């Protein structure tokens, strides 16, 4: 249906409908990229990729977000140009195509919510421990400890599912904007409603992907998980309070993929401790 909107948008000279078609098209490509990434994440780890390919979902979300941001800037620039000098828009039957686009998006939201709601199983929680390295001094030795936490990868915070839902929701609101602009053009002859609608859609696209891009960048840059910001210090204090532990050194915690945290710390402990 995105191609139907695009063809009719070009024929009618409606930038709003063209904008909506671009958004719907990238929703489809984003969903396809998400499906491909979901398959790639199932590939097993090997010697060269010891953590596996689970970060494919983060990369897919980041690339999809950049494409949508580019489209947003393009549509905004075109809309500003048309707002300065509004062109004539052939709005005959534009309302019907706009309503059909809204119905397609509503069906997409229903299908997403219905399918996503049945895809959650029970939560899982696992731990894996790395080896121990000992470096003896006169009174203490270093003990390095690797620890990761695995929470159900099908949770609501999945980058793929979050991105897809945001795009479908923004596209639905964009379709509403196209319908409103069509009514204004048919009723009052306000041709400027078309570029204003396009600006609205461009802003929706940008807003819907900024959070996704931000989260993806933080994960790719291996920022400490935000969920752990307020609890790690307390955890360090509890570890230091253990018998024989002198200090916590070189703590490193990062997000491997959605809700999968990896951490490593080095402990300075007494050489008499087990």
Image (cartoon, rainbow, N blue to C red):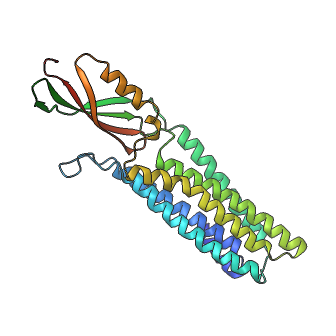
Quadrant of the rendered image containing residue 103: bottom right
Quadrant of the rendered image containing residue 198: bottom right
Q: Position of residue 262 (x, y in %)?
A: 33, 39
Q: Position of residue 150 (x, y in %)?
A: 36, 34
Q: Position of residue 49 (x, y in %)?
A: 23, 50
From the viewer's perspective, is residue 108 above or below residue 117?
below
The mark tally for this picture is 0
Q: Is residue 167 left or right of residue 260?
A: right
Residue at point 75%, 70% (across, down)? 196
Q: From this viewpoint, which residue is outermost toward the top?
A: 243
Quadrant of the rendered image containing residue 60: bottom left
The residue lying toward the viewer, choosing from 194 and 117, is 194
The residue lying toward the viewer, choosing from 164 and 97, is 164
Q: Is residue 85 left or right of residue 3?
A: right
Residue at point 42%, 35% (across, down)? 152
Viewport quadrant of the N terminus: bottom right
Residue at point 49%, 35% (across, down)? 120
From the viewer's perspective, is residue 78 above or below residue 233?
below
Q: From this viewpoint, which residue is outermost toward the right?
A: 188
């Amino acid at each position: 249906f995105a191609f139907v909107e695009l063809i009719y948008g070009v024929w009618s000279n409606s930038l709003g409908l063209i904008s909506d078609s671009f958004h719907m098209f990238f929703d489809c490509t984003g969903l396809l990229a998400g499906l491909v990434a979901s398959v790639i994440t199932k590939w097993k780890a090997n010697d060269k990729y010891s953590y596996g390919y689970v970060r494919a979902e983060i990369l897919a979300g980041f690339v999809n977000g950049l494409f949508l941001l580019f489209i947003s800037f393009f549509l905004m620039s075109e809309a500003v140009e048309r707002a300065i000098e509004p062109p004539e828009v052939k709005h005959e039957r534009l309302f019907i195509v706009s309503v059909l686009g809204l119905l397609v998006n509503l069906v997409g939201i229903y299908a997403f919510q219905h399918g996503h709601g049945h895809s959650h199983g029970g939560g899982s929680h696992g731990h894996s421990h790395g080896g121990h390295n000992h470096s003896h001094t006169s009174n203490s030795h270093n003990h390095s400890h690797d620890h990761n936490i695995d929470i159900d990868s099908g949770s609501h915070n999945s980058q793929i599912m979050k991105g897809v839902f945001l795009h479908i929701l923004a596209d639905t609101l964009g379709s509403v904007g196209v319908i409103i602009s069509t009514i204004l053009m048919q009723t009052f002859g306000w041709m400027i409603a078309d570029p204003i609608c396009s600006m609205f859609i461009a802003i929706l696209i940008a807003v819907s992907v900024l959070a996704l891009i931000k989260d993806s960048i933080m994960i790719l840059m291996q920022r400490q998980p935000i969920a752990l910001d307020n609890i790690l210090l307390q955890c360090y204090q509890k570890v230091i309070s253990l018998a024989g532990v002198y200090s916590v050194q070189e703590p490193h915690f990062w997000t491997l993929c959605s809700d999968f945290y990896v951490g490593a710390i080095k402990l300075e402990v007494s050489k008499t401790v087990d």
